[in-house]
Amino acid sequence: MTQHDRLLIIDFGSQVTQLIARRLRELNVYCEIHPYQKVDDAFLDAFAPKAVIFSGGPDSVMRPGSPRPPKSVYELGVPILGICYGQQVMMQDLGGTVEAGEHATAEFGRAYVEPAGRSDDFLFGWFLEGREQVWMSHGDHVAALAPGFEVLGTSPGAPFAIAADPARRFYAVQFHPEVHHTPNGRTLYENFVRLAGFTGDWTMEAYRDEAIRLIREQVGDKKVICGLSGGVDSSVAAVLIHEAIGENLTCVFVDHGLLRHNEADEVVAMFRDHYNIPLIHAEESELFLGALEGVSDPEEKRKTIGRLFIDVFQKYAGGIEGAEFLAQGTLYPDVIESVSFSGGPSVTIKSHHNVGGLPEKMGLKLVEPLRELFKDEVRALGHELGLPASFIGRHPFPGPGLAIRCPGEITREKLAILRKADAVYIDQIRRHGLYDEIWQAFVAILPVRTVGVMGDGRTYDFACALRAVTSVDGMTADYYPFSHEFLGETATRIINEVKGINRVTYDITSKPPGTIEWE
Ligand code: XMP
């Protein structure tokens, strides 16, 4: 557990709770999100927050049994900020009243808060000079303030859009300061954490040092195995653990023959040669491609690869004498999802690590040094650890690799063509300076041959589809709006440089309804 000052976000189920954490992390403040069901007196005692934030939520405080924080939270003597539902909970808990929303007072979307009351409040002084754009999303609203509170701001649908009890350092807002559409929301958070006495010492450098200390504490002189995929998460986890325990870390890199051009060589060069990390290169392409022969159903492909991956990993890792731990690059969003507001599923090990079930099977304990980080923080940590920028910024690559970019039966011939086409496409994207704007880009080779003409001859070769999407988290995605010039130039290059492809298409499906990968 971190030794930094900690802020507790009690989650009442808002869609944007994670953004509160983002805003705070940007201010170098360490925070954790916990669903209200988990937060009881004992929890508060153990967590010892320096400040607390109540998130928004979909429920109505007027419904009997609606979500509440434990009463003891108000006795901690630390600043509390209530947001939206969190404001209403705070008011009602402390003796104010909340009124049911009517059509006329509900506010959804952009709204404006006008100053009311004093203008010298520490948190809101910045705010009271004129009307302020904020983002609202509420039906109910506070109708009477709790004793000790005063109003500082008001909007058409929320007479107490900002309420404060400066003596107790309790603040409550009806709007969402964490979203982009509340342009000055960051200042509010900044003032709140300063008021609470945070020093902003949650830096990546501090995190790295502390993570190293914690890994040493957890692992001692025992050995750790890390499944390396070449992706950012497992790479950063491996380098971090290596800094902590050196030679006691062994990485296993499973090469299933479905990797991109040069990928295996790059991973081996980086980790074995550059970082001197003991690395087992499990070259098992024959095994995987053999098992995939004749398989064209996407689910069967995934299952075959997943099953073999576990067998292979176990075979190589089993030979590492005295290994007691398995390292995984689990990130904070996976951890949060696992204890979601709705009671969600219990902790799931990210399926894309392809080692689900392995820890139990091999009797290994888990080391998850990235559990507290968001994706961009993992990248920052990678930077702190000296991983090259080109590596840190790489697009995600799925565990089943090129298998799911080769609809229909997988053959060595198709894989070779796909690798070449993909390399040309990515080179084009890099040359045009577009790589970092794109979440993921790749080529899929289609299971059809089409007729073409090159020189004076007829060709009968494969068609391929280019895919490029923008996305924040891979859950939804939009196709990337390349210029026609770019697409034309890329198609020409692929057809000229890659023998076996004579037709290039561009996939303009968003997700939903499509998925990012073709299978
Ligand atoms: P889809 O195709 O579901 O992909 O829109 C969303 C994101 O997940 C990646 N993906 C996978 N990653 N194992 C992985 O490690 C998988 O089986 C897998 N399937 C999809 C995909 O590349 C995209 O980033």
Image (tube, rainbow, N blue to C red):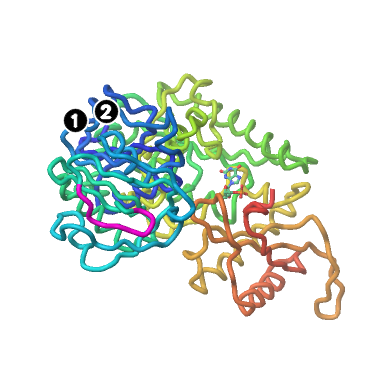
Q: Which mark is residue 483?
A: none
Rendered location of residue 317, percent (x, y):
49, 28
Query: Which residue in the protein does label 1 denote?
Result: 75
Magenta-span inclusion, residue 447: no
Query: Which residue in the protein does label 2 denote?
Result: 71
- From where the camera sits, is residue 120 visible? yes
Asked if disc 2 is less than 8 Å from ligand 1, the answer is no
Residue drawn at x 24%, y 34% as measured from the top left: 213
Q: Residues within 10 Å of mark 1 (few under 14, many from 20)?
A: few
Asked if disc 1 is less than 8 Å from ligand 1, the answer is no
Spatial CA span between label 1 and label 2: 8 Å
Identify which amino acid the numbered label 1 is placed on.
Glu
Comparing 153 with 182, the one in front is 153
**Magenta stretch?**
150-158
Rendered location of residue 267, percent (x, y):
48, 49
Q: Disc 1, disc 2: CB below 8 Å?
A: yes
